[in-house]
Structures are given as C-alpha cells and as structure tokens.
Amino acid sequence: MKRHFLRWIALAAPLQAVLCVAQITPHPWVSVGPRGDVGTFDTQGRVRSIQIVPSGRDFKLFVGGSSGGLWRAFGSQGPVWANLGRNLPNPSVAAFAVHPSNADDILVGTGDWQHYDLGDGLYHTDDGGATWSKVPFVLSTHCFQILYPDPGNPNLILAATDIGLLRTTSGVNGPWVPRLTGTVTDLVPHPTNPAILYCAVMGSGVWRTLDGGASWQSMNPSSPAFVAANVGLAALAICRSAPDNLVFVYETRNTGIVSNIWVTATAGQNWGAVTVPTSPHPEGPGQAQHALSVAILPTNPNTIYLGANELWVSYNRGREWQVVPKVIDRHQDHTRLLFSPVTGDDTLWICSDGGVFQWRLTSGQSTSWNGPANGLTSLNLMQHADMDAIRDLRVVGNQDTGGAASTTGGGQWTGFGCCDIYAVAITGDRSSFFEVESYWSINAEGSVVARAFGSSSEEDKSYPGNPLQPVLFYNRFEDRVYSLTQNNATLVARYVSGTSWVPVLQLPAGTSALTGDRLNGQTLFAWGSAPGVLTVLKNNGGNWVVARSSPIGTNQIQSVFASTERVGESWALIQGPPVVLHTTDDWQTWDTNASGNLDALRGSAGLWALAVMPFNPRVMFVTTDKGVFATENGGASWQPFQDQLPVVQIRRLRYVVDAHHTGQDKLVAATYGRGTFERLIPRPPLVYVDQRNFKLFPDGTFEHPFPILNQGLATTPPGGMLALNGMTTYAAPAVLSQRLTLTAYEAPARLGR
C-alpha cells in the first residue's frame, strides 16, 4: 500500500475546513411509510372524497386524499391500492368524478376547504392516471367540494366550489359557467331523476334545480329560527328509497359549531328542525368548519347518520341521537358518509381524518380499508419530524392521527398517541452508546409526553398551568428540552431526566417557533408572527440573553437552519416571494445570494424547510407546497429534485449522515399527505473526532465522535473525510496509510506530535 508521509511541527498551522466535492446523484425518492394501518384504531390520513363504481361482479373503490392524491382498490382484493395520482400536478383531491362508462376517465377538482386551500383548478385523465392534463379554466378557485357528471349525459357536469356552482354541457374542457355564487359546500342528486339536484351554499342555504343545474330556486326552511346568513359549512343527504326525504345540517358560520339540523319529507317544501346532539357535542370546538357529513339509511328515512368530531346515529328522525362506538367509528372529523348502491344498503362507508372504513350495519365493528402496514397507501399528513443517524431513528407527528416512530429507518413503524402532534424531538441518555433514546411530543392542546423507543408507556412532561407551543428543541449538549408557552411566549426548559420545567426568558409577543445551533449549544433562534423578526439568544454563563431581536426580512420567517461546521453560520427561509438568507455572524449581517431562481421555479408554492449538505454548503435543498428543489452552487441556481417524489407539501426535511461511514447519506422528507420519503445521497464517508467527548463507546458520528485522532484515522475509509473538532490540538501520526480529506468543524483544528 502506498504511504503518504506528513511531517508535523508542534502546534502546526490551523487546519481549516475544506469543501468536500459531492454531486447530487440521480437516485430516486423512496417511500418509507408509515403505510396503511398505523396508529390508534388502525388509522391513516385524511380521506376527503370517495366513489364506488361497478366492475363486472366486482367493484372499484376510489378515494381522494386531502393532500394525498387519488387511489383505487378492487373490492375482491380488499385494501390493496393503486396510486392513480402519482403524476397528478396537485396532491389535493377533495373532489373527483369517474366517468359513468369508463373508469379510466377521471376528473379531479383540487383544494380542500379550510384544510388544504391550495387548489389550482381541474385535472383530467383518460388513461387511469398515467397522464394528467390541466383543464382550461378561466375561473380562480381554491377548493372543489363535489364534481357530479349526469349519468345519462357525461358532458353535463356540475361542480361545487368555493366560488359558486359551476356547470358545463360540453365535457371537462368546458366552458364552465357559474350558476350560483358563494361557497357551495355540498351537492346531492335525486336517486332516480338526474335533472333534480340539491346544493348547500354558505350564507344562503339550500337550493334546488329541476333542469340539471341550469337554474336554481331557494328551498330554505321558512321558520324564523332559520337565518340564511348563519349557514357555514353545510351537508345534505337524500333517502334513496324515499327521495322526498332530505336532511340539511350546517355549522353556524365561522364558529365550527353544529347548531341546526333540518329534515323534510316534502322535497324541501317544508322543513322541520330536529335535535342537535349535545352530549358530547358532535363536532368538537370548531371542527365542523372543515369536517361535516350526513347520510340517510337508503331503506329508511328515519335513520340518519351525522359525522363531525364524532359519528352519531338517530333511529327516530333526529329526535334522539346515539354515539357510534369507536370500534366502528375508528376516527374523528368525518368528511364523507356514503351508502353506495354498488355495495348494498347495509354498508356505510366512513371517510375521516383517519382514512376510510367499511361498516356493515349488522356488525359491531368496522373494517379498515387503509391497507396493511406493509401496503402501498401512505396518506399521513406529517406536521413535524425528527431523525437521528444513530440506529436509524425516525419520529413523525401527524395531523389528527397521532405520531409514529421507527428504529429501522422507516422499515417498521409503531404508532403512538392520538390527535394532532405538532412537535417531536429525539432525546436520550448521552452517558453510553447503549442509551435508550426517547422521543418527546407536543399535541394540539400543548401537552408534552415522553416515550422510550420500543416502549408503549409514556411519561407526562406537561408544563403546569400553561400549555406549550407546538415547538420543541432539544439541546444535545445539555440534555435539555426547550419550548415556549402558548399564552405569553416564555422560553422554558427542563432536563430530559429532570422533574420540572424552568422559565428561562420572556420573548417578544407572537414568538411561536424555536431552533438552535448544533455545534456548541450556545445559540437559540426564535421567530413567530412578526414579519421578518428574528430573535437570537446567547448563553451567557448559564443564562440566556437576547443578543438581537429585529427583522432580517420584510415577510414571514418560515424556518432557520444552523450549520454543523461553522459557529455563527445559518440560513433562513423567508416566505413569498421566497428568499434564502445566509449569515456567518449570527445575523448581524447577511446576504441573499442563495435565492437564485427559486421564486420563478416554485410558482405559487410556499416554502417550508431547508437542509444543507455537511461540509459542502454549496449543496442545499428546500421544500415547498409542491416538492423539493436543490442547488449545487450555493443557491445561484436551483433545480427540481423530484425523481419519484409525488407532488406534495413537505413540512420537514432532514439531511441524515450515514452513521456506518459508508457514504450512504439520506435526505428525509416528511410530507403533508404522503408519509415519509427518503433519497440516497452518496458522498465520501464522514467520520467525526472530538477530544472533548468522554462518552462510552463512541462511534464516530456527529452525536458520538471519537475522542482520539487515531480512532478516526482507523475508521475513515479510503477517500473519506475525517472531521476534527477545532477546539483543541490533536496528536497526529507521522504517516497516513490511506487517502483521506482532513477538515475541521466549529473552529480550526491544530495537529502536533
């Protein structure tokens, strides 16, 4: 073996950090879940739309995710799903319509009311989702609620949208003509006469058409108790066997509270008010603003099902209500309830924020159609995520379905908790390599819980008397967790192994986000509702003080990312128009050179997260509402980084260095609607050394660096990089037996003999 001789003098010149050449490679993104049934009651993400069509003796079940695309399953195969939305340019399938005579011909309306208001019109496929085309559409919509093609004349299509009831008689390409104004939240057809339909409109109530949507007449209750202006999100149902019977339910506008349920047996000529369930209240605080549904048993107009935060049933036309047990109603926030003639009058399909479930009314439990944990579907709406290179730990926090954790890099997941998880953080006992890491989470109510990986038990870590914000930062140098109080933006902290939170510092009003440096634990960054205002905190002898609190831009700060190599270096994402800011002095000064062509590329998509390649800051990645972009030249120019990644909002992004030192780094994206994806980023292997580390069994990772230079030299593969913490001098050998790149982090390193 060829030897490379290095001659040293004591306290040689400082070893400065050098760039390691690494290029973005063509490896595709790979879905790593969680998939199918993971979590409480076998739930998944928000299913917003559903349609069932016959297929010979079988049937095809189509579902649309709030931000998870379009999926299809065959009834005979059960919950085995095909992804029809892989190439769909917008992930939000709140409404869709399958052609009455061709199940490969599908029209999709994008945008989910008050949940994913990022719709951009209509898309059409005639080859089962292999290709999609944008429908020419001159009207500006953000949300579609229902698409309905006339079964006898598929060129006649009605659309319930946030700008009105739209109609075309010329097929999907229109022209589309408004027939009603206002936000149309539901549309139901007469079961035997396609010319008759009913719709519900915010602020104006119930309308009926007798001519296929060409003209409409108001059909509101005549009671003084009915106030049309109070109608918010509303739902309608019609009885298949007795179509003069309808139910009209709505939340009082802008409150989310279901306060009125009306029934008619005269096709809307006369309405009567019925009891609203009150114990417990069906919608929860504000929930009915985005999730409300109703259905009538096809064979009996007296049996009504109401879905909001709970699922309720009345067997006497609304006089009395019963809560449907959770073994049937697997989740909350019900978006659609469907009795399909294809699957029988005794089967109710339940769509909710937890997925899709089939309930045969004679059964005491429902069947999940989300698929097995090793299946294909992944509709989880991830709001937060944390990753650790050591032992491939992953933790995600989902919208309304709890969280999930993996110790196999996403190979297998275990669900935990329920409802919204707004923040997660991996912590652990840093005293030994064989530590039992834990992960902490904060839910929508501000409750903090800690769990050990591999354990189902949890420990309450809530802050007494004042809920915490949905932010959580773990300082690995102090074994401390930091958070913010919701009411007064106080920075609070506690040791992972401690028993109480301690108020640390009062921050500016509106502060709601927090992160910190990853090198020495001496800096925290906080921001919130004040446009562009960034607060920098410094650790001054154990006390945190505000070093600066002033704008770094004119628009909202979305995220801050701190360097793993240079003290004082970090990046910030500023929302619309997007700007990537860069500083090397903790935001005393900064530049905007990293923004490049990002504004032109991202279109209307907002920015979410940023990641930087270790020891090569010219390679960066940003996430948007519609995917990932990458740069290899420090942000001078950006390019799409989407290979096999669905078009979807990505809330969290992490660059995870290969802990096995083979150079197989990963970029991990937590999406809001399609679960977690990872992409291989091959680069020279990276090994860390830090003489300050006294932990047992160091492994050469950033979290557990080797304390001795010779250990790092022995572990670094040929062609790899050896990174030395620059706070000390290292005793170096006179001879190196392999090619490698020496670099330093935190400060210049010194070598001596």
Image (spheres, grey):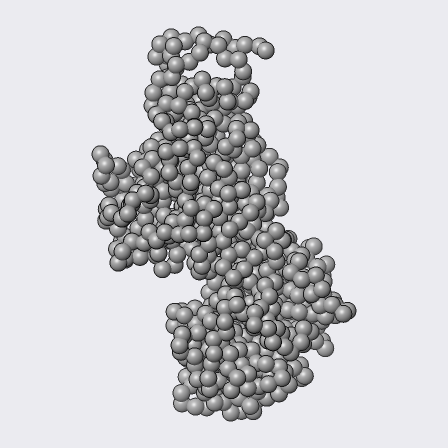
**Which percent across, then down, holds residue 439?**
41, 46
Quadrant location, the C terminus: top left
Q: Nearer the viewer, residue 201 or 356?
A: 356
Residue 552 visible in the picture: no
Q: Is residue 733 visible?
A: yes
| Location of residue 76 with respect to 611 vertically, above or below | below
The percent coordinates of residue 317 (x first, y second) are 51, 86
Quadrant where the N terminus sits is: top right
Q: Is residue 492 left or right of residue 45?
A: left
| Residue shown at the point (26%, 58%) measured from the top left | 465
Question: Left or right: where does residue 560 sit relative to residue 243?
Answer: left
Residue 59 image point, x, y percent: 71, 68
Give residue 684's quadrant in the image: top right
Query: Can you say whether 156 is above or below 662 in the image?
Result: below
Q: Quadrant of residue 328?
A: bottom right
In the rendered picture of this protein, how many numbered marks are placed on residues?
Answer: 0
203 or 331, which is in the foreground?
331
* Residue 350 versus residue 1 in the image, above or below: below
